[in-house]
Image (cartoon, rainbow, N blue to C red):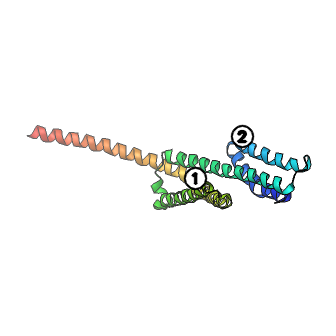
Amino acid sequence: MTEQEVYEFYNNTVKVIYSEIEAKNNTLPVELLFEINSAFDHLKRIHIDNESEELQSQKAYSHLKRGCLDAFKLKLKYFNDDVSKIYRKKADLRIIDNGQYLADFIQAKAEIFKIAKEARLNEGKMDTELALQEWSHVSVLIDSFEDKFFNPEKLHWAEKQSFFHFNANFWLGVLAGIISSVVVTILFSIL
C-alpha cells in the first residue's frame, strides 16, 4: 500500500461517511477523530521518522478502515433513532399509499438490518474488507430508505388523518354510549 492510496481512500470513502455523520448532529464523535489522528500519525512517520512507506501506509489505512466501520455503525444508530421517531408519531402509517407505505417500510428496514448484521458478523471474522463493502451497501440502503420514507408531507398528512379519525371514532363512541343509555332507560321504564 502507498501513501497515495491512503489519501485516496480517505478522500473517496472516509470523508464521505464522516461528513454524513457530522452533518447529522453537527459534531464528529471523538472516537472517529482518534482514528483519523492515528492514521495521520502513521503517515507522518514516513516523512519525519523515515519509516517504511508501505508499512506505515498499511497501518494508517487500518485506522481509517476502523474509523469508517465505526462511522457506518453510527449512521445505523442514527437511522434507528429516526425510525423510532416515525413510530412515535401519532400517525397511522397504514393509511399512507393505501397501506403500501408501511409494508414497504417494514421490508426495507428488515433488509437494512439483515445486511448490517452480516457486515457485523464479517467484522467479527476479521474480514474487514468484506465488512466495509457490506457496511457501504447498508449506507446506500439507508440513504434510499430516507429518501423514500422520511417524507414529511406524507407523515404530516397521516398525522392529521389519524387525528380526525381518532376524534370521529371517539365522538361516535360517546354518541353510541348516550344512545345506548337512552335505549336502556326507555326499555327499563317500559318494563
Q: Nearer the viewer, residue 174 or 87?
A: 87
Residue name at image x 12 percent, y 37 percent: 189
Q: Which residue position holds label 1?
A: 153
Q: Quadrant of residue 124?
A: bottom right
Q: In the image, what residue type sits under mark 2?
A: Val
Q: Is residue 130 above or below residue 66?
A: below
- Camera-nearest residue between 84 and 96: 84
Residue 150: give x, y in percent of width and height.
59, 53
Badge count: 2
Q: Secondary structure at mark 2?
A: helix
Residue appearing at x 87%, y 54% in the figure: 52
Residue identified by numbered label 2: 30
Q: Residue at 35% x, 43% y: name it.
A: 171
Left or right: where 94 falls relative to 143: left
Q: Give me the residue at 48% from left, 53% from top.
A: 93
- The label shown at residue 21 is none
Q: Nearer the viewer, residue 31 or 176?
A: 31
**Nearest to viewer (mark 1 / mark 2):** 2
Q: Which sits in the foreground, 28 or 25? A: 28
Q: Where does the image place residue 156, in percent across and percent down from the top left?
A: 54, 49
Extreme left residue here?
191
- The residues tagged by marks 1 and 2 sit, at their Cα atoms, a distance apart of 35 Å
Q: Which of the marked residues, 1 or 2, is nearer the chain's N terminus?
A: 2
Secondary structure category for the residue under label 1: helix
Instruction: Please rate how many residues cluster around mark 1, counting C-alpha atoms within 10 Å: few if below 14, some from 14 to 19, many from 20.
Output: few
Specify the amino acid type for callout 1. Answer: Glu
Q: Is residue 50 visible?
A: yes
Where does the image place residue 94, in percent across and percent down from the top left? Answer: 45, 56
Q: Quadrant of the C terminus?
A: top left
